[in-house]
Amino acid sequence: MEIITTANGIIALITGLLGLIGTGIGTYFAVKNWITVMKTKNSQEIWTMIMEIADSSMKEAEASIQDGETKKQIVIDSVKASCKAAGISADLFLDQLSNYIDSTIKFVNGMKK
């Protein structure tokens, strides 16, 4: 009888450990997915903020008498300065920002025709 009780105890212990391991693995992947979603959301929020700053900066730059490339650099510098003041790095978005400025200018110029 004692052997059966010990065997049942060992089986219960193994089953419990397997359940804990399964729960741990599930929790790990849930947390990993949550972190990925939060990073994506933060990136999207940062990009939205950068576009808003760029839009405002483009309006101001358009009023200047500078050439197109200089205006574009003014906008990029303005966005970088605003992001720095907010404690956010815009470096990851510079290529995207450059493309956004170009496409916005192309759209606006197309509307003027």
Image (cartoon, rainbow, N blue to C red):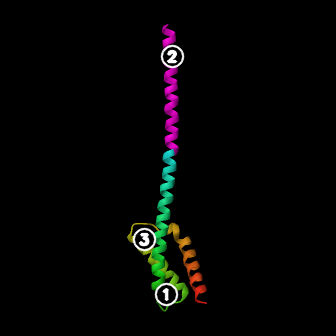
Image mark count: 3
Label ID, residue 8: 2
Q: Which residue is mark 1?
A: 62
Identify the amino acid type marked 3: Cys
Which structural element holds mark 2? helix
Mark in the foreground, 3 or 1: 1
* Res 104 quadrant in image: bottom right
| Labels 3 and 1: the sequence-earlier one | 1
Which structural element holds mark 1? helix
Identify the amino acid type marked 2: Asn
CA distance for labels 3 and 1: 21 Å
CA distance for labels 2 and 3: 63 Å
| Residue 15 on image: x %, y % | 52, 25
Q: Is residue 47 above or below residue 11?
A: below
| Labels 2 and 1: the sequence-earlier one | 2
The quarter in which the C terminus is drawn is bottom right
Magenta range = 1-29
| Residue 70 on image: x %, y % | 51, 85
Mark in the foreground, 2 or 3: 2
